[in-house]
Structures are given as structure tokens and as C-alpha cells.
Amino acid sequence: MKTVRVWDLPIRLFHWSLVVLIITAIMTAKTGGKKLEWHFLIGYATFVLVAFRILWGMIGSRYARFSSFLFAPGTIIAYVTNKDAARKKYLGHNPVGSLWIFALLGVVLLLIATGLFANDDIASEGPLAKFIDKDLSDRATWLHVQVCGKLVYMLIGLHVAAIAYYYFIKKENLVIPMFTGDKTEDI
């Protein structure tokens, strides 16, 4: 067995910071009132974090770069249908995990964009809501809460289910490497 640094420190910090920001965003949105001011600040912080991740996905270390887990449709289909004869072990993201990463980044960006135009029909609105009419702001709010918010819940659920599947069925702990950065590979 050989130990390989798969998740560099910036990736690990991104991952756990995003976890904290999403949990806090959900809590502040559900609480409402003055907490919505915090919700907006969390949205801005999340935007900076995701912007960093996109940049790091272009210039970061090997397993952080999007090019290391950008798979052709045929590879993804072969992986899902188990036609990848060896069903090889990927040190970084496997083809399905890579789709999840791109989906999460896309949904979080859409969540941020719609939040900039959203309103709560009481006292709070995104900083760009004043530049569009109320009807359009209401649609942005619906997208923000009803579509993007629920997609984030779904993606989080899939992520946790995949981690549990790998831990209990495949006997591979994916959580520890997200703390240490290291995984082992067969030589």
C-alpha cells in the first residue's frame, strides 16, 4: 500500500467551509427575522468560496483540477452500468462523484444568483432585487427556495448516502481522507 496525497489543504478547507456555510445558511433562512442579514452574509461568503473553488479547479493540485475528473459520457455510462470491467478504484472522484461535484457547484451558483434578486415579502430582499420588478423577484425567490434549496438538500442526501455506501458496502472510509488529505492505493 502506498499513501497518496489526494485532497490538498485548500480542497479540504473548501469542503468543510462549504459544509458549515450551507448548514448555517439553512439555519438562518429557517429562523428568519434579523437572522436573514446573516443569511445574506453567508451567501456572499459562499460565493467567494465557490469562486475560489472554480479557480482552484483550474490551477490547483492534480486531484483538485476539474480536468482530473472530467469524464466522457461513455466513461460515465460504463461506470454506472458496471461495464468498466475492473470497476477500477479512483483515487480522486469517480465518474459519478464528478457529476455530483459539477451539479453541486452549479446549483450553489444558481442559489447564490437567485438569492441576489429574492425577497421575503416582509422586510428583506437581495441586494439586486431593487433593479427588477416584484414579479420577477418573486420568481427568483421561488427558484431560490423551492428549486435550488430542494436540489441542495437532494445533493447533500446523495452525498451522505454515497459516503455510507462506500463505508458499509465497499469498506472504504471517505471521511478520514477529507480530514487528512491522504488515501492509499495498491501498488
Image (cartoon, rainbow, N blue to C red):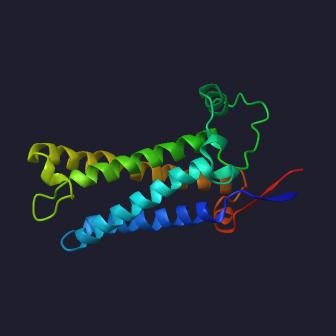
Q: Position of residue 132 (x, y in %)?
A: 14, 46
Can residue 149 be spotted in the picture? Answer: no
Q: What residue appears at the point 60 percent right and 60 percent down from the top-left corner?
A: 11
Is residue 118 depicted above or below 43 in this figure?
above
Q: Residue at x 67, y 54 (%)?
A: 61
Q: Is residue 37 left or right of residue 130?
A: right
- Quadrant containing the N terminus in the rendered view: bottom right
Residue situated in front as seen by the camera: 160 or 103: 103
* Residue 169 place in picture, x, y as percent: 68, 51
Q: Is residue 37 above or below residue 160?
A: below
Residue at 17% x, 59% y is: 125
**Looking at the image, can residue 124 be seen?**
yes
Left or right, 108 with respect to 169, comes to: left
Whole-percent x and y of residue 17? 49, 67
Compare residues 12 and 22 and report the one nearer the observer: 12
**Residue most extreme to the top:** 74
Outermost residue on the front side: it is 59
Residue 8, position in %: x, y? 67, 61
Q: Looking at the image, is 178 positioned above or below residue 149?
A: below
Residue at image position (53%, 52%) is 55
Say how many tags the image has: 0
State left or right for residue 185 relative to residue 120.
right
